[in-house]
Image (spheres, helix red, strand yellow):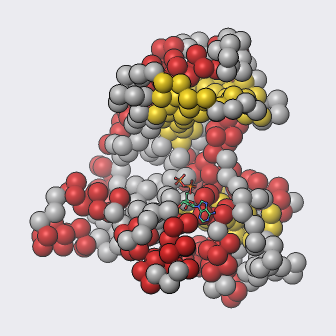
Amino acid sequence: MKILVINCGSSSLKYQLFDMEDENVLAAGIAERIGIERSLLKHTPGRGERVTLEKDMANHKEAIAMVLEALTSEEHGVINSFDEIDAIGHRVVHGGEEFSGSVLIDQPVMDALKRFIALAPLHNPPNIMGIEACQDILPSVTQAGVFDTAFHQTMPARAYTYGLPYDLYKKHSIRRYGFHGTSHKFVAKRASQMLGKPLEELKLVTCHLGNGASIAAVDAGCSVDTSMGFTPLEGLIMGTRSGDIDPAIPVFLMDKLNMSSSEINDLLNKQSGVAGISGVSSDFRDVEDAAARGDKRAQLALDAFYYRVIKYIGAYSAAMNGIDALIFTAGLGENSPEMREAVCDSLTYLGVQLDKDKNKVRGKEGDLAMADSPVRVLLVPTNEELMIARETKEIALGLS
Ligand code: ADP
């Protein structure tokens, strides 16, 4: 079975074609600058070299057509015809309260996705465009929607309810949803395999630390709390996002600095986080380098980031009455021994004992805890595309 995974942004479209017999990636790539002049497709066939194909793509439908052309081309193709694609899995950011798992896309699902545009105005519209483009070009192929929010739908009401008038939840769906669910689910499942214990017997804290960052409390395989909320702005300090702040600050910015809602939105999402504190960069590598050279604000940005990660892990350990394992994933989680050490050093009270030699690793799966550490510390590289392909396969098999 071959499955095409698609992740659409407003001007980009990422794809991977999987052969599900061995979960091998047959081809991967990205269409960039869709709807902007000089659009291009970067396509890497299996073991081949990456090729860059330049051709104007006015919209996502033209981009999908170009991806399919590349996948079947004589020069860089990996399949003979479109008929070899058994199903398409789409990453969809927001599934509201309606989707607690992946779904076969049909008209009622499309209607629901359109309703959720209000909740994810930047993300759901390009996701919808990608689905519609595929429906137009490959009408007979099974399509599945895999949601960033779905895994967190198991959160209890006490965790997802804000201290706001209840009517705002009932009338405007204002509650905590959580994101990065595909990644938290993927690493939690992998952790259970690595630990040789069923998920049902494990209390895990999964730390997805990349440019966007979130932590989840996973009890018996179910997300019971997570740091992102109504939007992906809540929670940890991130590359350019503020994470938790006093909600009175935007009001102060409006009243005292005359800032508009869009200026505040931009400030909190794009000019804050470690980039805003350090003034150096949103990329943790640059911030770590600057701190190592003695840049005090860079060090402060890292310290503030670590401190909040440590606080959330403590909070989630309290929420679950203890933890069995701590899992690090995503760009920073997989690649920064410094960050993992700084965080774990403050968690010895929980029974976290990091093996500092084993921790000297980047991007490679492993158990980094001391042999006798009561709490395991796992590095699990995430693979959201593979998770989407697996979920899509389940849906396609359910139909056959
Ligand atoms: P996103 O998908 O949210 O864009 P990623 O999961 O790709 O984010 O993570 C990107 C972040 O990971 C960047 O801030 C980058 O600096 C950090 N990162 C990647 N490699 C390293 C490394 N070797 N050391 C420290 N940080 C790293």
Image coords of residue 376 (percent x, y): 78, 72
Q: Quadrant of residue 132?
A: top left
Q: Quadrant of residue 114?
A: top left
Q: Nearer the viewer, residue 67 or 380?
A: 67
- Does residue 206 appear in the picture of this structure? no
- Is 52 displayed left or right of 267 in the figure? right
Residue 143 locus on image (x, y percent): 58, 24
Residue at the (62%, 74%) spot, across then down? 339
Name above or below for residue 269 compared with residue 315: above
Q: Residue at (35%, 55%) from the top-left corner?
A: 174
Q: Nearer the viewer, residue 395 or 379?
A: 379
Q: Quadrant of the N terminus?
A: top right
**Quadrant location, ligand no. 1:** bottom right
Counting every numbered tag in the picture gives 0
Can residue 309 be seen in the rendering of this structure? yes
Dividing the picture into quarters, in which one does residue 364 lie?
A: bottom right
Would residue 136 appear left or right of 172 to someone viewing this image? right
Q: Give the image location of residue 204, x and y in percent.
A: 69, 66
Residue 29 in percent (x, y) is at 59, 33
The image shows residue 316, relative to residue 106, as above or below, that is below
Q: Residue at x 48, y 43 (%)?
A: 93
Q: Point out the image quarter for the C terminus.
A: top right
Q: Residue at x 41, y 62 (%)?
A: 240
Left-right relation of 75 to 100? right
Location of residue 36 with respect to 93 vertically, above or below? above
Q: Residue furthest front?
A: 293
